[in-house]
Amino acid sequence: MAAGPRKVSVLLPTYEERHNLPLVVWLLVRAFQESGYNFEIIIIDDGSPDGTQEVAKQLEKIYGSDKIVSCMLCTAYIHGMKYATGDFIVIMDADLSHHPKFIPEFIRKQKEGNFDIVSGTRYKGNGGVHGWDLKRKLISRGANFITQVLLRPGASDLTGSFRLYRKEVLQKLMEKCVSKGYVFQIEMIVRARQLGYTIGEVPISFVDRVYGESKLGGNEIVSFLKGLLTLFATT
């Protein structure tokens, strides 16, 4: 079994997550403290007008600047990575749809197979989705199925963003990936396979956001399809 991460940096992108942020940070801190892993949480905020940045600063005071790092007016993972000091990086949503309790399972899986990437999957084992209506489930399943047929990436959940990466692997993938939006997560896995990186999977339960509204709309779906076809033509 591999030694596993010495320190995990969590990249937590936010936009208007004032209500969700304190709870997800508390859950993250608890998950790491109970499992005994060294960690830091990097809050990447894209200029939220709802007070998210003020909440992030308060959390930094509460938990300490060695555990909470606020990257204000940051627009992408690449900006947050500049602050990361861990040798492994977790990317997850801040809206409570990704539960931090799965992170210790990601780490155990990584150590088992010495994987470069561990991806949470809703479509394998006891993974699943809770709180979505039939339309949203069909969109997600359909997107995943189309992607599997076109790209054959060898992973069961391609549109999810809850993943653990070796830091140097994530940096390399960021350099290679050109997609935006939902296709970005797909391209990360496709490029990882092309570059010979190993991928493990852990079943997760995805829960619809607690506060606020989903950012998935018609424009995002059209953008996804265009991006997917571009990826199919160029890989």
Image (tube, grey):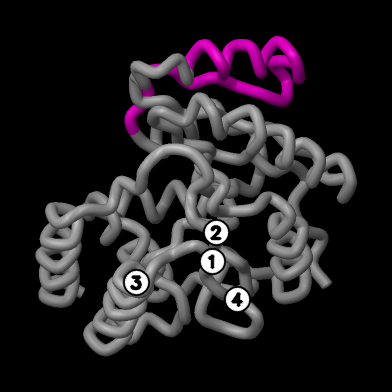
Asked whether 84 falls inside the magenta stretch, the response is no
- Name above or below for residue 105 compared with residue 103: below
Q: Which residue is mark 2?
A: 207
Instruction: Please state the horizontal and vertical placement of residue 195, each as a whole percent of the image.
Output: 40, 70
Pick the front one: 155 or 133? 133
> Nearer the viewer's eye, disc 2 or disc 3?
2
Residue visible at 63% across and 12% down in the picture: 58
Question: What whole-number distance in Å separates the C-alpha atoms at marks 2 and 4?
Answer: 11 Å
Quadrant in the rendering for residue 194: bottom left
The answer to the question of whether label 2 and label 3 lie on touching residues, with beta carbons closer than 8 A, is no
Pick the front one: 53 or 168? 53
Q: Earlier in the sequence, mark 1 or mark 3?
A: 1
Mark 3: which amino acid? Ser
**Span highlighted in magenta in the image:** 53-75
Question: What whole-number distance in Å separates the C-alpha atoms at marks 1 and 3?
Answer: 13 Å
**Residue 127, label in figure:** 4
Question: What whole-number distance in Å separates the C-alpha atoms at marks 4 and 3?
Answer: 14 Å
Q: Quadrant of the C terminus?
A: bottom left
Instruction: Please state the horizontal and vertical placement of residue 135, each as a whole percent of the image.
Output: 30, 71
Q: Tell me, yes or no, if residue 148 can be seen here.
A: yes
Mark 2: which amino acid? Val
Q: Quadrant of the N terminus?
A: bottom right
Q: Which residue is mark 3?
A: 140
**Residue 92, label in figure:** none
Q: Earlier in the sequence, mark 2 or mark 3?
A: 3
